[in-house]
Image (spheres, rainbow, N blue to C red):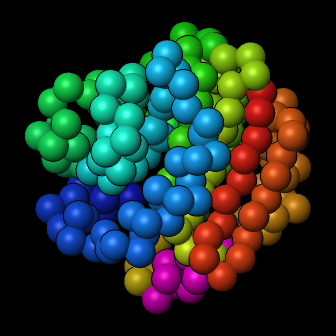
Amino acid sequence: MNRKDFFNKCACSWDNDKNKLDLHKIKTAVIPLLDLKDDDTILDVACGTGIFIETLKEKYKDIKVTGIDFAQNMIDKAMRKFPDTNFIVTDVISLPFENNAFNKVMCLNAFPHFEDKNKAVKEIYRVLKKDGLFILAHTNSKLNTDTHHRNVGGLIGKDILPCNEKIYEMLKNNGLKNIEITDNDNVFIIKACK
């Protein structure tokens, strides 16, 4: 089984794993960082079944958001939940968008699973508009995220977040600036601008 097959298989039960605490963290710790405006265009990278989009649309019903994921079953489920949202099956390392296409790019609970994190960041930078905002967020601390993946084992057992310094350098080397890292007992969040 490859990584794509693993996430396709997980799609049917993916929403069962979401919990109220995670949703609360998305609402209170992540979405406010986006500083959303009505005319923003948002890319949800590795959107899965649309958990971030679901939380976002509770408050911002008409905001323009596009979700991408490399797992067809995740996208199929997201499309059934949000028929008015644009979803595309694609990999983060080869985004099918023009340069400077989005004001905001969100990556929630997915970064450890990217096989080529540097290429992913390079693509995210490319599709961000000038002064655009990139948020990389986890609804757990770095330690708890890494521990969870090790405990699941198998294909994702080694999917861990690089150390803060390495992520900082990766973002900086790909042109992002004003990089802020929050890593506490509740969340791991990186905010950066183009």
Q: Quadrant of residue 103?
A: top right
Q: Where is residue 136 shown, x and y percent of the image?
A: 62, 51
The stretch of residues the image draws in magenta is: 142-151
Judge whether residue 146 is colored magenta. Answer: yes
Residue at the far left in the pictured view? 80
View extreme (top): residue: 98
Evaluate whether residue 61 shows in this view.
yes
| x 58%, y 47%: residue | 32
Secondary structure mainly formed by the magenta segment: helix
Which quarter of the figure is the C terminus placed in? top right
Residue 178 spot, x, y in % from top left = 87, 40
Q: Nearer the viewer, residue 193 or 159?
A: 193
Q: Residue furthest front?
A: 59
Seen in the image, is 64 located left or right of residue 45?
A: left
Residue 189 image offset from top left, x and y in percent: 67, 59
Residue visible at 31% across and 45% down in the picture: 58
- When the figure is inspected, residue 184 is found, relative to residue 63, above or below; the finding is below
